[in-house]
Image (spheres, rainbow, N blue to C red):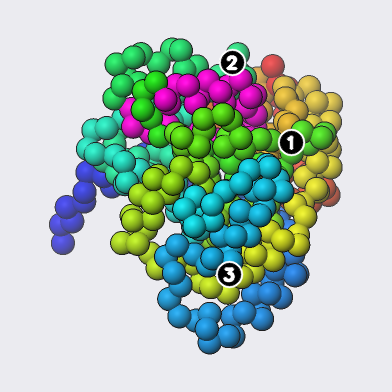
Amino acid sequence: MYLNFSHRLENLPPYLFIELDRLKAEAIREGRDVIDLGVGDPDLPTPQSIVQELSRQAGKKGNQHYPSNKGLPEFRQAISNWYERRFNLSLNPDTEILPLIGSKEGIAHLPLAFINPRDLVLLPDPAYPVYRSGTILAGGIPYPLPLLKENNFLPELNKIKRGIARKAKLLFLNYPNNPTAAVAPEEFLEEIVNFAKKYNIVVCYDNAYSEIAFNGYRPKSFLETKGARDVGVEFHSLSKTYNMTGWRIGWVCGQEKIIDALAKIKSNIDSGIFLAIQRAGIVALKEVEPQKIYERRKNILVEGLRKLSWNVQEPKATFYLWVHLPSGFSSSLEFSQTLLKEKNIIVSPGVGFGSSGEGYFRIALTVSEEKIKEAINRVVGMRNGT
């Protein structure tokens, strides 16, 4: 049978991690002790109070029907209360908050509400791959904004040509950043608002790592910036903060017309979040403190790699390290494959997040301190960083 695939499917970027996945599966089949520092999936279990609430709610008949597409009012109110406590922002739970089946789902679907064929979308490079794939699936054209070390991994808006800016409909941003672990100062967020107003661009701000920060640093909400609520929305997730990656629950909040547009898209695609999961999410937002364990892991890994003379910049937030390739390697994919083959360690090649990620690899702090120490011991003797 000959299958005629859509141009959207054919235009999706290649999955550069596929070879690493194959090598990982092969290593496991061979019984090798693989340390996976590649995946951004917390290794710790979901807190028991959240699990227990799901168990209580799942058996209730009232929770087993189709949920409202706009989410439980009580869940939206819990999000609003959390925003008030965390960022001192007052959000209308009826018009400015929309629950999502994980923030990834909302990020992927938002372009469908604003992008017509050949419209431009500004997105960081390197970046979470869903910004690009969501753009392509909506028929838009990704326009990459390089994130470079010399500019603290912030896009340089003043280098975007006016003709490009005028054609752009959306701008994706993510700070604290995956994969670079960079953070955004207030003046940069103000620049973003002014840029979006000037060119009538919708800002899509991914703030999934706002609660994983170190040494007293407290990431801000984009919506705290003056004028931000006129031009954009912010995505959040319970995945990283509360070890709930498999639960698929998050939200988007901000400019109510943007929220309403995404809600219309979702009403034609999904049927909302299982009510028992939403009620468990309320417990998470009300009662559970974010994890603090990543700071200890970060300290161990940074100290260990620096003793090996690897070029490591200590992050202020996220549970990632963005590390220069050791000398002797020109390809991040080659380095990642070599590390797995020779040392049984998995890291993510920087090029998998975009062409500007070449020259780097990403380490996730999602294994135990003992595994991190073991990984450091294994790489002793590899070529030093530059």
Describe the element under mark 2 as helix, strand or loop. helix
The residue singled out by tag 2 in the image is: 151
- Observer-nearest residue: 25 or 226? 226
Q: Is residue 176 magenta?
A: yes
Mark 2 closeness class: few <14, some 14–19, many ≥20 residues within 10 Å: few
Q: Which mark is residue 193?
A: none
Q: Answer whether labels 2 and 1 touch (C-beta < 8 Å).
A: no
**Which residue is located at x 59 percent, y 41 percent?**
207
Describe the element under mark 3 as helix, strand or loop. helix
What amino acid type is highlighted by mark number 2? Answer: Asn
Q: Answer whether labels 3 and 1 touch (C-beta < 8 Å).
A: no
- Observer-nearest residue: 21 or 47? 47
Cα gap from disc 3 to disc 1, whole angstroms: 28 Å
- Observer-nearest residue: 361 or 1? 361
Work out whether residue 368 can be spotted. Answer: yes
**Which residue is located at x 28 percent, y 47 percent?**
9
- List x then y, in percent, for residue 80: 61, 53
Foreground disc of the pair 3, 2: 3
**Which residue is located at x 44 percent, y 69 percent?**
68
Q: Which mark is residue 277?
A: 3
What amino acid type is highlighted by mark number 3? Answer: Ile
Q: Which mark is residue 218?
A: 1
- List x then y, in percent, for residue 309: 78, 22
Q: Is residue 238 magenta?
A: no
Work out whether residue 359 can be spotted. Answer: no
